[in-house]
Image (tube, rainbow, N blue to C red):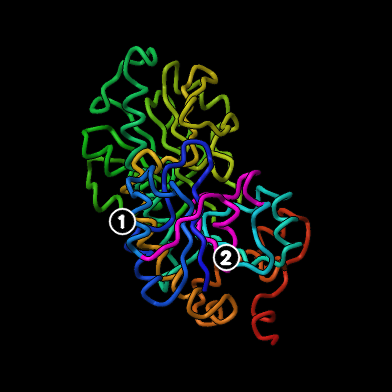
Amino acid sequence: MRIGLPREVKSGERRVALTPDAVATLAGAGHAVRVQAGAGLGAGFADAAYAAAGAAIVEGAREAYEADLVVKVKELQDTEWRHVQPDSILLGFLLLAYQRNIVHELRARRVYAIAAESIVDASGRLPVLAPMSRISGALAIGIGAHWLMHPHGPRGVDIADARVVVLGAGSAGTAAAIRAHALGANVSVLSRVGPRLAALAHRFGLDARTMAMQPEALMDALDGADLVIGAINVQGGATPKLIDREHLRSMGEGAVLIDISIDGGGVADTSRETDFDAPTYIEEGVIHYAVPNMPSAVPRSATLAYSAALLPHVMALAEHGARSALQRDDGLAAGAQLFGGQVVARMLADSLSTEPRSLTELLADP
């Protein structure tokens, strides 16, 4: 199969979907890999390394997209979707529910779109999204500590003395809570998922609070909080708005909100996407940080983790094609958004005000 690896163009994105070692594995299995020049430079992987791994280096994005399977990190940008070939497979963090115009074009091209953020394993976990979430959660504490310091804001609080509130106990929330706790912060974790809270409570013992996501508990936790981490993930859907302006005012001037959930719209009424060039803004006196590709701050580490998690799925698609690979692996099928241009994911269908086709029926239809 022809596999394309384009250079990411989203603002501040330095990751690449596959490392040279991953490309070598694919090339060794007989697949033809095209890598756009400079695709790996942001993560420290030179074109020469990809060439040595057996890839062909192509200059432009168009040549990279001239493939049966295109492997990406972040969602298609306005400059990219025009290159997507008819009947091709697209794999990456796609976030299609927020890209109606692009979805229309992909449907017209009969694309097989598989969202890496929705792929599940045998335990129902998200094996590709999870390592990126863990990186974001861990980074969030350091980023929050930076913005709590003078002169970035009036708080002037060291993270060891800070009250940190984590909303969500998934991969990102757990990583944030562990990092904050290790640095000596006063940590509270709120979640709707009871077993996750129980696991965190057992880990922290009496040194941190875990509580159910109830309105009263949320208001109590946010009152006077120095640093709040939004780490709620709704698979394929929008993040619930948990924080309103009254909550923000209760936090006080100079408090910091790191919204890891911004890909889904964010946890606050005031959340809006930022980027690495202008990462923050202030609402109700609270510093908001809402960069959607936080792992790109550590692009090499993030690329190594992403490539390792994604490679088995890339190999399955390359070896068997979209139909057979999805038939063989229910976890991969959970990530299917478009099948030959037909909408098969409920959340995506809801965003388009349409009904999804049954993937099971489409796979059974020769």
* 60 part of magenta stretch: yes
Question: What amino acid is labelled 1 in the image?
Answer: Ala
Residue 359 lies in quadrant: bottom right
Looking at the image, which residue is at 52% across and 36% down?
Answer: 11
- Residue 111 placed where, x, y %? 67, 65
Residue 122 lies in quadrant: bottom left
Q: Secondary structure at mark 1?
A: helix
Looking at the image, which residue is at 45% across and 18% down?
Answer: 252
Image quarter hosting the C terminus: bottom right
Looking at the image, which residue is at 38% across and 12% down?
Answer: 154
Q: Secondary structure at mark 2?
A: loop
Depth check, front residue: 301 or 209: 301
Left-right relation of 178 to 43:
left
Q: Note whether 46 is above or below 361 in the view shown.
A: above
Circle nearer the viewer, 2 or 1 = 2
- Residue 179 placed where, x, y %? 27, 41
> Dot 1, how many residues are within 10 Å of its Cα: few (below 14), some (14-19), or many (20+)?
some
> Dot 2, how many residues are within 10 Å of its Cα: few (below 14), some (14-19), or many (20+)?
many
- Residue 322 placed where, x, y %? 58, 75
Depth check, front residue: 87 or 326: 87
Depth check, front residue: 358 or 103: 103
Of callouts 2 and 1, the N-terminal one: 2
Q: Residues in magenta?
A: 54-81
Which circle marks residue 1 in the picture?
none
* 245 part of magenta stretch: no
Looking at the image, which residue is at 51% across and 71% down?
Answer: 332
Which circle marks residue 199 in the picture?
1
Please indicate, yes or no, whether residue 33 appears anywhere in the rendered image.
yes
Q: Work out how far the residue at label 2 is from the one at label 1, CA to CA, in angstroms.
A: 44 Å
- Residue 102 placed where, x, y %? 70, 51
Question: What amino acid is labelled 2 in the image?
Answer: Ala
Which circle marks residue 67 in the picture?
2
